[in-house]
């Protein structure tokens, strides 16, 4: 070390340490990215052997081919397919099990997991603690569960196509994406079909589900005991049920489309503090199924062409306004002991309303009542429908309107809207006559 006698020795030593520290930092920054390697796997080689050789942060690129392996990724790395190679689990166990944090799987075909529901065999099993995993641009086919994600936070599942063991009975299949005890998941842009439930969400909070297309399953999405989630711009069709929300609160369900589901479009069961807005629910067995729902806003929805528009039980403390109920075979089936008032400041539109608007304010001058004594009678004794056009039944309906003693509890709206707010339902009605692959 050269010593400048005109500068105190302590200052010179400090300056040297500062320069050395700076070069150590620069060296560390330069060495970081350079230390990450790209390792290639060719057909005939073993992917697992290359994963075992890789260091944390490396990328393993798998060339196009078919690889019969059950993989275990136990370090942070990227597994990237070139030309979409296939890794097959040969119908045994999990095809890929992720045990480390910060793992990315990109551009792969992952297939042929085992079929043990007890062991929860999956195409990709993201086990507890494997936080920030990302699965994207991949095909997961003929697996029991597509992805099983358990106690792993901030996981992303993006733009994948997931199908199950479609030749199995529904009860013997797994779910497309299973989330259990997670936080912060992002499930976006996936197409999921021929599984038990396309998305199964249990004890998982602060998640986002957007732009997914869910069809030919039991439920498109099945929520249980989950809070603070967003379900937005999803399509669900040809399932038994489109969306089922059970024992949940603080959900935002907006701008979705549910159609051709045999049981219900959207089920709300034991739900609090939620927002259900601007959804299109068409041509389902029941458009909305509402049971034990409180402090929830239902606004701007189109409920049209369903066998039953709304099946409602109880649920008095909600805000229901600005919706269009159009040409459902039965607008409301209400099971309750007292009237429930809907409408609020915006009002709802009912296509079977027969009132008038003398002052031209866009709101009806007489109240709309969804159900009467004849409706209740036909629910209990369906064969009565054969007599609906008979004078006796029409007389019974008139008597029920005139004499309060025969009146039954109903959904009542004092001043319904005279015109629907939305025009999207007409476009969707035409769209339903086309192949669902062209659905928006």
Image (spheres, helix red, strand yellow):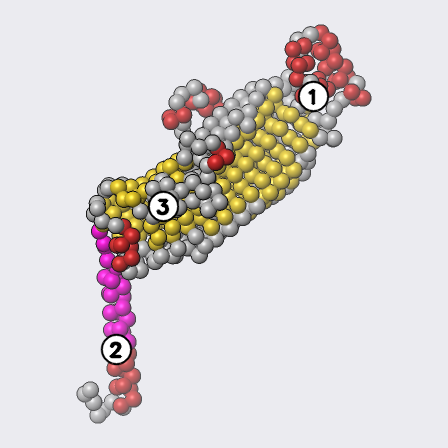
Mark whose residue sits in front, 2 or 3: 3
Which sits earlier in the primary sequence, circle 1 or circle 2? 2
Mark whose residue sits in front, 1 or 2: 1
Report which quarter residue 291 is drawn in: top right
- Whether residue 12 is visible, yes or no, is yes
Q: Residue furthest top?
A: 391
Q: Position of residue 133 (x, y in %)?
A: 39, 51
Q: Which residue is mark 3?
A: 95
Report the front residue among 341 and 69: 69
Q: Which residue is mark 2?
A: 20
- Tell me the residue at 43%/44% (across/down): 121
- Whether residue 189 is visible, yes or no, is no
Q: Position of residue 416 (x, y in %)?
A: 63, 25
Report the front residue among 172 and 279: 172
- Taking the image as shown, residue 171 lies to the left or right of residue 161, namely right
Report the front residue among 334 and 125: 125
Q: Which residue is mark 1?
A: 380
Q: Circle 1 sits in a helix, a strand or a loop, which is it? A: helix
Q: Position of residue 258 (x, y in %)?
A: 49, 30
Which range of residues does the magenta coloring cover?
19-40
Q: Circle 2 sits in a helix, a strand or a loop, which is it? A: helix
Query: Cβ–Cβ below 8 Å for labels 1 and 2?
Result: no
Query: Cβ–Cβ below 8 Å for labels 1 and 3?
Result: no
Mark 2 burial class by Cα count in 10 Å: few <14, some 14-19, many 20+:
few
Q: Circle 3 sits in a helix, a strand or a loop, which is it? A: loop
Cα gap from disc 1 to disc 3, whole angstroms: 51 Å
- Taking the image as shown, residue 287 lies to the left or right of residue 18, namely right
- Tell me the residue at 57%/22% (across/down): 307
Query: Cβ–Cβ below 8 Å for labels 2 and 3?
Result: no
Cα gap from disc 2 to disc 3, whole angstroms: 49 Å
Which sits earlier in the primary sequence, circle 2 or circle 3? 2
- Tell me the residue at 71%/7% (across/down): 391
């Amino acid at each position: 070390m050269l010593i400048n006698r005109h500068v105190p020795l302590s200052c010179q030593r400090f300056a040297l340490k500062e320069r050395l520290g700076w070069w150590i930092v620069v060296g560390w920054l330069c060495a970081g990215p350079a230390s990450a390697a790209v390792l290639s796997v060719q057909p005939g080689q073993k992917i697992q052997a290359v994963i075992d050789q890789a260091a944390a942060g490396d990328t393993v690129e798998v060339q196009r081919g078919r690889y019969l392996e059950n993989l275990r990724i136990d370090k942070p790395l990227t597994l990237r397919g070139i030309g979409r190679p296939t890794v097959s689990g040969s119908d045994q166990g999990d095809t890929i099990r992720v045990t480390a944090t910060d793992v990315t799987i990109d551009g792969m075909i992952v297939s042929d997991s085992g079929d043990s529901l007890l062991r929860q065999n999956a195409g990709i099993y993201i086990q507890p603690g494997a936080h920030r995993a990302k699965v994207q641009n991949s095909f997961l086919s003929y697996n029991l569960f597509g992805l099983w994600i358990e106690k792993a936070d901030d996981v992303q599942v993006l733009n994948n196509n997931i199908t199950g063991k479609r030749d199995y009975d529904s009860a013997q299949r797994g779910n497309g994406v299973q989330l259990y005890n997670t936080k912060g998941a992002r499930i976006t842009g996936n197409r999921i079909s021929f599984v038990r439930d396309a998305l199964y969400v249990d004890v998982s909070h602060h998640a986002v589900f957007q732009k997914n297309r869910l069809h030919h399953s039991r439920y498109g999405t099945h929520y249980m005991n989950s809070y603070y989630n967003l379900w937005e711009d999803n399509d669900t069709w040809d399932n038994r049920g489109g969306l089922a929300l059970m024992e949940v609160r603080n959900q935002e369900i907006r701008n979705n489309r549910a159609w051709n589901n045999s049981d219900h479009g959207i089920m709300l069961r034991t739900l609090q503090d939620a927002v259900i807005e601007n959804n299109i629910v068409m041509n389902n067995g029941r458009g909305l199924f509402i049971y034990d729902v409180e402090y929830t806003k239902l606004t701007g929805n189109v409920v049209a062409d369903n066998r039953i528009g709304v099946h409602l039980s109880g649920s008095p403390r909600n805000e229901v306004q600005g919706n269009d109920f159009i040409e459902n075979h039965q607008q409301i089936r209400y099971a309750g002991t007292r009237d429930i008032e809907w409408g609020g400041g915006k009002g709802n539109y009912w296509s079977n309303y027969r009132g008038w608007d003398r002052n031209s304010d866009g709101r009806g001058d007489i109240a709309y009542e969804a159900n009467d004594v004849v409706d209740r009678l036909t629910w209990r004794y369906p064969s009565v429908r054969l007599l609906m056009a008979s004078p006796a039944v029409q007389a019974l309906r008139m008597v029920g309107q005139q004499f309060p003693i025969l009146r039954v509890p109903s959904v009542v709206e004092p001043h319904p809207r005279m015109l629907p707010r939305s025009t999207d339902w007409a476009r969707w009605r035409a769209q339903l006559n086309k192949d669902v692959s062209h659905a928006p």
